[in-house]
Every structure is written in C-alpha cells, then in structure tokens.
Amino acid sequence: MAHNTHAQELLTRRVTLQIANQSIKTVLNRLSKLTNVRFTYSSSLIHAERKVTVNASNQALGEVLNDLLTPLKIEYRVDADEVILNPGPVENEAEKSTFQTIESKQTGDTPVDITVTGTVVDEKGEALPGVSILVKGTTKGTNTDVNGTYSIRVPDENAVLIFSFVGYAPQEIAIGNRSSIAVTLRQDDKSLDEVVVVGYGTAKRRDITGAVARADINAFKEAPNVSILQSLQGSVPGLNVGATTQAGQDPAISIRGRNSISGGTAPLIVLDGIIYRGNIVDINPNDIASVDVLKDASAAAVYGSQASNGVILITSKTGKATKKPTVEFSSSYSLQEITNKAMLPDDAAGFLRKKADRYISLSRTGPGLLQTNPAFDVTKYLSPQVLAGMQNGTETNWWELLTNRRPFISSNDLSISGRTEQSSYFFSLGYTKQQNVVKNDDYKRYNFRVNLDTKVTSWMKLGIQSFYGLSDYSGAAPSLDDVQFQVPQLAPYDANGALVRLPDGARVNPLLQIAQTNQETRSTLFGLLFADINIPFIKGLSYRLNFSQNLIQKRNNNFSAFGQNFNGEAFKANAQQYLATLDNIVTYQKTFGPHSINATLLYGTEKRSFDSTRAYSAFFTNDILGYNKLDAGQAAQQTTTSSAWKEASLYSMARLIYNYKDRYIVTGTVRRDGFSGFSTTNKFGVFPSIAFAWALSEEKFIKDRAPFLDELKFRASYGISGNRTIGRYQTLAKITANVGSGYLFGDGGAAQQGQYLSALSNNDLKWESTRAFNFGLDFGLFNNRLSGSFNAYVSNTYNLLFNVDLPVVNGITSSPANIGKLKNTGQELTLSGRPVQKGDFSWDVTVNFSRNRNKVISILGIDANKDGVEDDLVSSKIFINHPYGVAYDFNITGMWQVADAEANRIPAGFTYGSYKVEDINGDGTYTAAADRKILGYTDPSYRFSIQNSFRYKSWEFSFFINSIQGGSKYYYGQPGSTLPNPDNISNGNIFNFDYWTPENPNARYRQLGFYTVALGETFSPYVQRNFIRLQNVTLAYSLPQTLVRKAKLNRVKLFLNGKNLATITGWDGWDPETGTGLDRSAYPFLRNYTAGLNIEF
Amino acid sequence: MKKLLIYSLTLLMGMNLVMSCKEDEFLKEEPLDFYSPDNSLETSAQFQLSINYLHNRLRNIAFGGIDLDSYFALRYATDFAVNATDYQPAVKLNDYKNTMVPTYNVPQVIWQNVYQIIANANVVINRAKLSTKLSDADKNLFKAQGLFFRAWGYNMLANLYGGVPLVTEEISVPRRDLVRATRDQVYTQCKTDLIEAITSLPNIDAVKDGAVNKQVAQHILSEVYISLKAYDDAITTATQVINYPGVGLMTTRFGARKANPGDVYRDLFELGNQNRTSGNREGLYVIQSDYLNLASTQRDAMQWAVMSGIQNVTIKSSVDGKTVVAVKGPNEKWSGRGVGWIRPTSFVLYGMWNSGKDDIRNSEYNIIRDFQIDGVPTTSPDYGKWYVKDGYKAKATGFIDTIRYWYPILKKNTISAGDFPDAYFQRDAAGNVLSSPLGGRLLINGSDLFRDNYLIRLPETYFLRAEAYIMKGNMASAADDLNIVRARAKATPITAADVTIDFLLDERMRELYGEEFRMVTLTRMGKLYDRNKKYNEKAGLSIEPYHNLWPIPFSEINRNVFATLEQNPGYN
C-alpha cells in the first residue's frame, strides 16, 4: 500500500544506515530498499558517482536526506510515492553556463549553439517532471521541471538526446533542425521496482516468485470494448478470453487449462482487494488502472479454495501525482456490422429451391437424378400462407426489418482526479450505449465512481473506493431463430398496414416480439471502506481493515401482448444480492542487512445473500398498463414465486516473502478456508504453497560477464489450490415442491402442488483440489529492448467433482462425487522487443504464445473389463489419457451418391446425400456402440498473438493479430450440429450453405431431406475452429503540445480503430472463436469501426 | 523481530479464538427456499403432494410432456398409425428396423420417465411406513397409492421391454449394479403390489375424480394376471371391476351435449364428460386437465398430432388451374388445429369398419370423412364443393395431401365447436374473430387439448376378461364380453366362432383407437410384429419378429458399470 501513502509520510520513515565511502547512487539504492521509497534522478546531473558517507541511526528519512544532499547542492522534493532529486538552483545564468561550460570543456566539445525545448509527457499525455535528458556521448544534460518542460543546449544538429526516467523506457531522439521536441515516454513494465498487486497486498516485481502477469490494458484502449475483459483478449498468455456476440455481454474467461468438469472454469475476480461476484461489464473500463493475473498455484494460493482457476486482480484508479485537478474526457463512436454476410437468410427463390432440394426424389428425375422433374409442383409443399404470398408476389426481407441499419457503440467518459497534501481523489462519470445488429439487442450503462483517501492522522489513512453501475438491457430482442425462419413469401403487414399476428400460421410475427414492453436492468453498488494504520513503535508493521459491501439489484419486467394466444402475459421479477466482506490484514515489512521480509496475515469473512420475487399474470382484461398492473390479468392466472439463499465464508491466510540480497527470494503461503456450502464433515480446507526465485542477473559473476543483461530470474513454485465447485446446499437432500409438479382432482378442482425428492444428501462432497508446479524464467536484455517471460506448468487436479451418470432406474440421472483426476501441462511465452528505435520512430513488437495439454487421468476409477486400464466413460465421451473434450463420433468417409443408390450399394438407413461413415468393426451395420472413434479434441492446441506498434512523432499505429490453432488433432467443433431436421428446414427459411444435392455431390453437409437415424439427428462433420484474426488496428494522433498548450489543455488525442477486421478460417457459420456454426438462432459476430478522442486538461 | 512475532501471532490467535467458537455457527448451512425429506414427508397433506406428483408424471407421459417422438411411439408404428411427417423418404419409426435400435432416444425416454414414477413411488411407500404423524389408515392409503403407481410402471415396462431391473426400495445410495429380473418376476411384483394396494384403496365412487381407486387397481391386476397366464385370476379380478355397481358402460346419452345431435360414444369424449360428476361411469382412471388450471399446464398433444393439417390442403383452381388453398384455416367445427404427425392406418380409417356400417363409433359424429371447400372466393365454382365427394381428393397428386393434410378426422380426440375458449380463435389485427362463410370460427395455435382423458375405461376391462377367456379357449364367454361392448356401439353381435385374438385386437382398436397406448398392448401380447406386418404401411415393411420387445436403452447399459444389463435378442 506504499503507493497510496501520502508524500510527507515518506520523509518520516525511520532509517538506520551506516555506509562509508560509497557512491551517491549506492546510498540511494540502500535508502530505497530500507524505506520503500523510490528515488528519481539523473545520474549525470547530480553526479551520482560521487562518494559519500552516511551515518544514521533511527533517523527520519527527511533528516538523512537533508544531511546527505544539502552539502552536495542537490535538492529533493517528494512527489507521490517518490523522491525526485535535482541539482540545486544556480545563483544566476552566468554560473549556470559556467557550470555547463566546464562540462563542455571537460568533454572537449564545441561551444553550445542550439537550444532545444519541449515537454515530456507520459502515454496519457500527462507531464513528467524530473525526466533526465542527456546529450548522447556527453555528460551534459538537464531535467524536466514540474510542468514536464525542459530546455537544453546542444552542440549541433547531429546531437542525439537521451530521455530517461525511472519506470519508463528510455528514448533516443535525433535533433535534426528542430528546436522544439515533444517527447512521450512509455511506461516500462519491466521495471523491477514496479509494484505489483499480489492479493491482500502488493509486492515489488523483483520479489515476485510466481507466475504473475500484468495485462497491457492500454494496448486496446481505443477498441470499443464495453467490458474490460474484452481488452484482455490475447494480451496475456495463458489467459483465455472469448469473444462476445450480444450487447453488454462479458466474454467467457479461463486461465490455463481446464481444471474442472462440473465446476466453473472462470477465474476468481478481485476488485480493489475484494472478491467481486458481480458482472465485470458493470465496471467502467475507464476506471481501471491495472489488471493483474495470478496464474500459478503459488500466486493464487492466497485465495485458497477459490484459486485453482487463477485470479484476476482489478485495481481502480486513484488520484494521481498532480497538484491541480486533472480532467479527462474521452469519447468514441463505433459503427458495427456483421462479419459473415453468407449467414443471412435466403431470398424467396432460395426458399423454393431448398424446398425442392428437400424432396430430391420428387423434384429430380433421370439418370443420376440430374434432371428437373416436370411433375414436381413446389406449390404442393407450401403452407397456405406461403402459397398465397408467392401468388401475390410477396417478398419480405425479414432480416432487414429486424436488424438495425446503423448499429453502434458510443462511449463517453469524464473523470476528475487529483491529489493534495493529505488526500487523493478520483471521480468519474461514464455513459456507454451499445446497439447491436439485431433489433433491441441493446445495452446502456451509466457509471459513477468515487475513490477517495485521506490521511486523518500521521498514522492512519482512511479511504473509500466505490462505484455505482447501472446496466440496462431493456427491450425485447426477437428470437433470431424466428427471424431466420420467416419465409420471404410471407408479409409482415396486412392490407391495412397492421402487423399480421402469425405470418406462417404458427410463429408469432417477430415484429410483434420486438414490440413487447421489456425492462431489464441490473444495478451494482459497490463500496469498499478501508483504514490503513501504521502500528506505532514497530516500524514496518501495519494493519489494514477492509470493509466492503456490494448490492446487486436486478429487475426484469416484461409485457407481451401476444402471450397466451394474444390474451396478454406479463411478469415482474426483482432479485437482489447482497455481499459483505470484512478483511483484517496485518503486514510487516523490514529490511535488515541483506535480508528483507514482507509478511502478511489475514483473517476475514464473506457473507452473501440473495432473494428474488417474481409475479406473473396473464389474460388481461385491459392491458394498457402492461406489467405495472399485473392485477388486470385473470385472477386464476396470477402466480408468484420467490427464492432465497445465503452463504458464508471464513478464512485466514499467512504469507511470507523473504528476499536475500535481491538474489534469492522465497514466498510461502498457507490459507485455511471454510465455506458454508461444504459438507459438515469437510467444513475447512487448507491450501499451502511455496515458491522460490533466483535473480541470476544480480549475481556478480553474471553482471561482470553479461552487462547487457538487465534481468534474468528463474522461478519455481508449487502449491495446492481449490475450486469450490460444489455450491451452496449441494450436499443437502432436497424436496422440490411447486404447482407445476402438482395435480388437480375433478373438473374445476383447485390446483394443488406436487413435491418430489430432487437431490439426495451427500456428506462426502468437498472442493476440488489442484496441485500445480510452475517453472518460470524472466529476462530483459539491452536496456530491456528485448524482454520476455517463459512459464511452464504441470497441474494435477484431484477430488474432481463429477456428476456420475446413473442408470435412470435410480430415479435420478446423475449424482456428484469427488472422484476424477485431470492433468494439465502447458507452456507460455511472452516476448517484447523494440526492433527499431530511430529518432522519432520506434517499432515495438510483443508476441504471446501459449499451449495447454489437458488429460483425463481418472474419472470413475472402474476397470470393469479388467484390462488393467481404467475404463473410458463412453456415455459421457470421456476417455482416460485423452483430453476432456473429445470429438468421439462416426468417421465420415464421404457422401453416398446417386450412383451408389443406382448400384444398390447403400446400406440400410442411408440414402444418397447422406454421410458415408466408416464401419469400424466391419460388421456391415452402423451402431453407436461399435462404430465411433476419437476423431479429435475440442480444446485448442495453441494460441498466439502479435502486437505491433509503430510510433512516429505524434502518430501511433498498431495492429494486433490473434489466433487460436488446433494443430493436427485439436480444436474441433461441429458447425452443422444445429442445422434443422428435414421437417423444420422445409417449413422455414434458412441461410444458404453447402448441402448435398445431385448437382453438388461434394458438399460438406448432407442433403436437406434425410438424416440417418443410427448416426443421430444432429450428426454432422467435425471441423477445426482454427483462425487467424486481425483483431485490432489503431491509428492515433496526439495534437502537438504547442497547440494543445495554447488551448490550455494537457493533451488531445484523436484515434481511429478497427476491430475484427479480417479473419482467416475454414470454419462454417458465424464465427470460429465463438464456436457458432450454421446456427439459425445464434447471434452474429460483429466488426467495428471506431473514431474517438481523448482530451485532458 | 521477536516482539513482532509475538505481537502478530497473539493478534491472529486472538481473532481465531474469538471466531473459532462461532465458526461452526457462522458456517452453518440453512436452506431458505426448499424443503428437506425430514421436514416434508410427515403429514397427510405432505404425502398428498407426493401423490400429486405421481399423477403429474403419469399425465406427463400420457399427454406428451415427454419428448414428442416418444409420446408418438406409444401410439404409432403400430396397427393404429404411421408417422406422417417422416414419410418421404421413410425415416424414424417408419423405417422401423433402422430406427428402433438401443441408441434411439424413444426407448430411453419412456424407460426414464416410467422409472421416475417408480422411484418416487418407492419414496412414498417407504416414508409412509416411517411417518410418525400419519394415522394407520392414512399410512395404508398413501402406501396403497404408491404401490399402485409402482405396479402401473413396472407393468408398462415389462410389457414394452420384457424383464427389467426390479428396485422396490427408496434409493439412498445410487446403484450401478443392476441386473434384469425376468418378465415374470416383474409381473409377480406388480401382482403382489396390487393385491396389497387393493386391500386399502377405496372404491371409485368414494374418491375424488381422478384419484387412484380399487377398481383401476383391479383392472391392472387383471392384465397382470393374463401376463402371468393366471387366466382364472384375471377373469375373477376383471369380474370384480365389471360387477362393481359404481361402474358401468354408458349406453344412453349423457353430459353437457346430450341434447345435441350425436350419440353416446361421442358423449364420452365431449368436454367435461369424462369425470363421474358428469354421470360418466366408464372412466376407471381419468387423467385430469382443466383449461388454465396451473396444475395442468401440460395438455394432451393428441389432438394436434392425430388431426390432419387440413389448413394446408390445396386444390387446383377450376378458374385458372393454379394451386390454391382449400380452406380458410383450421375450423372449430372439425377439430382443433392439427399437423398430421400420427396418421391412422387405412385399416383404422377404413378397413376395420367394413363389416359394421351401423357402428356408432364410425358415425359422422365420431369420424368426419369430408369437408366443404371455403378457401376460395365465394364466387369461385369450387366454393362450397365437397373435397372427397366432389372428387377433389381423387385429383390430389402429392402424397402430402392425402397422407398428412387430409384424412378422416377422429373426432374423439377433440372437443366440439363452441367448447374452444376465446383465446383459440384467429383474429385480425384489430382483434376480431375470423370465421368461415360456411360456418365455424377459425382456430390458431390452440392445438393442444385441455380436456380430461381416459387412461383406462371400462370397455378395456371387458376386453381383458375376453382375452383371458380366449386364452382359456372359452370363446363363447369371450364373445359375450365383446358383444357387451359392441352392443353399446350398436355393432352387430358376433358369435364364438368369430373370436380370435386378432378379432379381439380389432375390437380393441374400434373401441379404443387414439386412446390406448397401442404399442404397449401389442408388445404385451407379442403381436407388434404381426399387426405391423398386417396393417402398417410403413413400419410393416421393415419390422422383424424380435421387435416384439423394445431394446434396453443403450445409455442405461452403458451407465450400469458394475453389472451387465443384458440386451434383448436381436438388438446386438
């Protein structure tokens, strides 16, 4: 929490240090370690190689600095959590130039004749004070002032300036003939002093022993990502983020491989230190300062029984190190369109063509069935409504009627932040509106955030981090299945211009569906109140109290005039969840000699409760008040249902990070977790972990031999973490009672409830456990021009909760038990480099790669066939020593053709245009028992992404390529499994796709009019979902500082962004990543074109 | 350092101590919105809820709340009907041999739903014994109802599959070591259960409409006795039902529409005429369903499935030769809206009536065999013509027109014009009900029937007794029983010489078409193959003798990992 501490407090930290005849640099390094304070300075300007002596015993840092620096004519000031050092003021210009002249003379340069001025800002355009500027090849230099401006004299046009600042990547810029150079420094994530959030506290990056990664959320800042999770897609190897298709949706996320079958695979989300159980999309992405990902068991182990899927730590913004308030406004507007136009429903002629193709034996004749049968009259196969429409020449484009012409996402955010001596603040307002392609697939979000902290006494800081988010999904989207299904020959309006109720006589007009009154909102109120107390008398010991409350309220109201056969139907549903967390955290940080420790003790509780009420009514006598007058429905049709639950957790945790000489670091943690949902015999679980790191680059023998090596660190960790999986009440026997299960006796008899035993009690159930080993390597070379990180892991999950399929003779179809074992192994690599850095031009590349292999070790543990190997669980398609997701099915070897039929070669149950499959046991028949095999696996084989960024002066261009690949055997899906059966396909419309006809004998999909029952109605080819996607392209331009300053602004940035611009794939249907294939009811995958701006003043 | 350690450990232990005594209390789990077996299987009212559920599940099977293919399969692919949708080319059970395989979901769905009833009946039987709050009379009564449902389920399973696993205890630890009992063992269990149930069950006139009663239990027991070849017991038991004064065949007009033109057979199927309160004495187990009653949202799918899709019938216009739709839409005067899934065989629609023209079960009130064209403008020469009589049907060229869109309407599966609720009518955008110029209001999706329906009706008891007599070779008594049913239908009496098992099956069809689970009857009697071969235009082409029993579901064999569930012969 050092990063939040108020400035003046830094100087009161106590120091004991005896050091003789060492360079200023060394002394400052030691002081930094002792006090956890960062020093920022230009070595050359303060002549940091000068030797000094310090003798301090329990003195305040301020005093030590005064004693040390005043004689050296070095000034210092405190800014946020750092101390900035500058040469003291010179008495007059003469002396200044003398000073510089002396330097010039020393280096033998020609006299100064060009003055270059400018401002140095960070990526957000914020002024950076204290940046060191050095003329390359000389010791001459200066620093930026508090406004980030500088002025330096250089010898000639060939001079090159080096801009450097702690925590930022250095930059070299050739002067040329310019006299004004604006510089933007980018944060250097590789800084070892960077503070990383580690769960219940922070640690310096140099102390990290586990697999922890900070996501680069700035990389996709310009993309129209409504949820922050979308900005993580492809950005951290091992963090798998899916794609979304509906408005206001959070994508699916997972970390590393699958550790659970019946349980969730989503990581635990922690917001500002509190486990967050709401929807991420309710949090304004613009309020987020950082996202850290805990990937391995040792890093995540502090969260015990909820850690085995990894942890995502989200930290919201706080007031920054500026004296005056910073106002930031950003706005963007994004146009959307569908990515795959081939998925649009067919036209009127296409509908008739498919109708004929559905009856091939009737519509075709002659050898090979290649001639049109003149006797075939398609009108015989049309419903009366379609027939009438066809005769009237009706052609309706239902898709156009039910989709938006100009779908968009617009986003506007305003924030004010700042810091005073005692306090810091961050206020923000946000409004996002998303209108997707399908009508009423809309989302609106209003956000409001207040983050405040203030030092009430010298030893106590109080603060609040809070937000309110309102997510509004109101509006009834039509069933896409109905939209695609509507036949073009049907008219939506009657002769009087009124909407036809049932265009095809059966399905409600989708235009009526979207006319429902629908309110669907979710509001989240989150508040974290905290106190940071520095325990007196023991330096380094502090106590933090976190008290957080989170209220999530959902409303879902709907009135449908067409419900209940147009008699009207409405409901009002309210639900609310309340969460309270209380954490007591004691930390102790101390450095003595070469040893330093960072210890954390935690004791906390979490309580959650939920309740919901739903009132329903139908058969309205007067429906004009809709769902707000439910009692206008028929009394006997009014029903109420309610539900409620509560649960509690109780936990304690201890963690110790021990660092010896910055070379050897050990982290040990243990967490004890209790959860009300655990069975009475297994109420508590204990989750230990240990990790070790060796910073090889700190060793002298490496430093001497490989000075280009900035960092080289080996890490190894081992830990046990859990996955709750069994939720509340899952160990209890359950009787379900409701009127839907009930009965009545006699005409006019009252509706009576029914009840049944819906679950058996199970006291043996417990959490799932994962033992994981992680090996890692972090490195940085050539001033971090090339850096990277490699992780390899093996994890073994045991006590896997599995719903064992039961013979239904038991009256229940499955029952959970902790029996299975899964294994995951994987590798992850991140490489970042700057291949080109020339003057104002730079090119940065980041490559991410990850690969995971999942294997089922055991499921039921039964070897009934006595072959020494556990039996596969074929009924659930689970195979021992294979990955969990298996494409186990009949193997398509081709398509039966008309010629086969004419030669009587087609086996019973098949016909031309049906899939020819392998007869594996060669018995001439095709059975599920004997003729299926493993065709491949559903998991991806590997994922990679490449981010390229080019910067030239104020221009920035970047593009991001993301890919998931299946290699030879992985990432299989079944795009055709959702195709309708012959009856449904002939009654309704559908998009065009590659189906078999005598004229298209090499089609991928069977003929429309027949499927082989033995293969199953949904049987269809398996296709790999491999894709390479140009996911993000951004062009940004920051207005010149001179212009911006004139307008009294800090920064103005304009940008254009394209998202999902191109995808290379062999998949059929909407999109490989979402896995939606030839699915009439799936929502389309969208592409975006965005323009936006950021202004700061 | 030492001071620190002591400091923090004390703090932590202190917190732990404060909390630890409360830990168990803090983490205690308390259900808020569901019951547990310990607090909800005690009182009489609570047990009634469990009994309600058993009725509910039975209705779910009978009315089509289960998967529709499975619902259909209890009826079609028999001598009653073919599948009218998967006809060209023949798939599903129209291609019987390739479809009725162990992986087909139909045997799985029926198996699962019947076993669900058995498992829940086992809970009632077990818990009724244990309850401390029930009177002895109530204990026996609830147990008897549980035994009835269990026996009904096992009897159905044995009829369809042969021997099945026999579980008679409440399951507390799920089993995966099941083996099949023999078919006789299953029937014997049914016998034992029913004999015990009969001692406690009240007579039919002493219970509410729809409730389990002694007579329906005796009826099933009689069928079980036949399966056990105990024909004398079957006759005795059936006789007990028949002779019970509270039941009897309806021979005179009754109920809500008795004053309207019609006959007593039609009265049996009018809305509101199934329960005893209407005066009906035939229903032994009447499945309860009321329009808009929240405890009967599952309505019978039969009307929708068996009624032809008449709204789709087309004719060639006499004016311009164009294909035009024959009717304005489904009309209440015929039936609710149908889609033509279950298409009765020619035998049912025509053949079986050949020898009995006066049979009221074939009257114009019970089978509608023609309709007037109203889909064309009133000025058209086609308007008002009869589709069959005036030769339009003969000119139909597509198979769909005569297989799926038009075939005679079995009126017993639907209610009469005037009984459809307002919600079922087609309206224009302004909300006005649409009707045909030839009379009758047009219907929309009101294709599900909310009427009560018979699971078991007294004529079937006569058929059981006749069957037992036939098996004993007493054809004269069998003929007597058959004639009692025929007499009510005004069919000509038969003689002992006419009596065969096939005649019995024909007569059952004439009386119970669209009503009984024909599949179950035929598999029980081992006649599925014979009758399909004889009468089913599609399934009959590929069916083989081993199909007289359904396969044991593949998934059930697969899941039963600790023992082998043997498959029926022919399916491997």
Image (tube, rainbow, N blue to C red):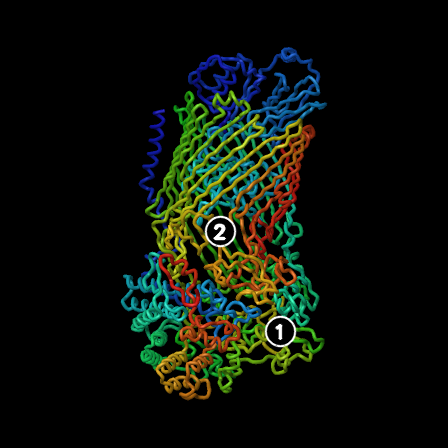
Q: Residue at x 66, y 79 (%)?
A: B383
Occupied quadrant, residue B494: bottom left
**Residue A900, image x, y percentages:** 59, 64
Reading the image, the residue beneath label 1 is B398
**Which chain does tag 1 point to?**
B
| Depth order, front residue of A974/A978 | A974
The tally of labels here is: 2
Q: CA distance from mark 2 to mark 1?
A: 44 Å
Left or right placement of residue B459 versus residue B236 in this view: right
Q: Residue at x 54, y 21 (%)?
A: A77
Query: Which amino acid type is marked by label 2?
Result: Val
Whether residue B429 is visible, yes or no, is yes
Left or right placement of residue A8 versus residue B209 in this view: right
Reading the image, the residue beneath label 2 is A886
Left or right placement of residue A174 versus residue B524 in this view: right
Crowd tier of the residue under label 2, counting other residues whose Cα lies within 10 Å: few below 14, some 14–19, many 20 or above:
many
Q: Mark 2 vs mark 1: same chain?
A: no
Q: Is residue B288 above or below residue A666?
A: below
Occupied quadrant, residue A875: bottom left
Depth check, mark 2 against mark 1: the one in front is: 2
**Residue B465, image x, y percentages:** 37, 81
The quadrant the C terminus of chain A occupies is top right
Q: Is residue A375 above or below residue B109?
A: below
Secondary structure category for the residue under label 1? loop
Whether residue A492 is visible, yes or no, is no
The numbered disc on residue A543 is none
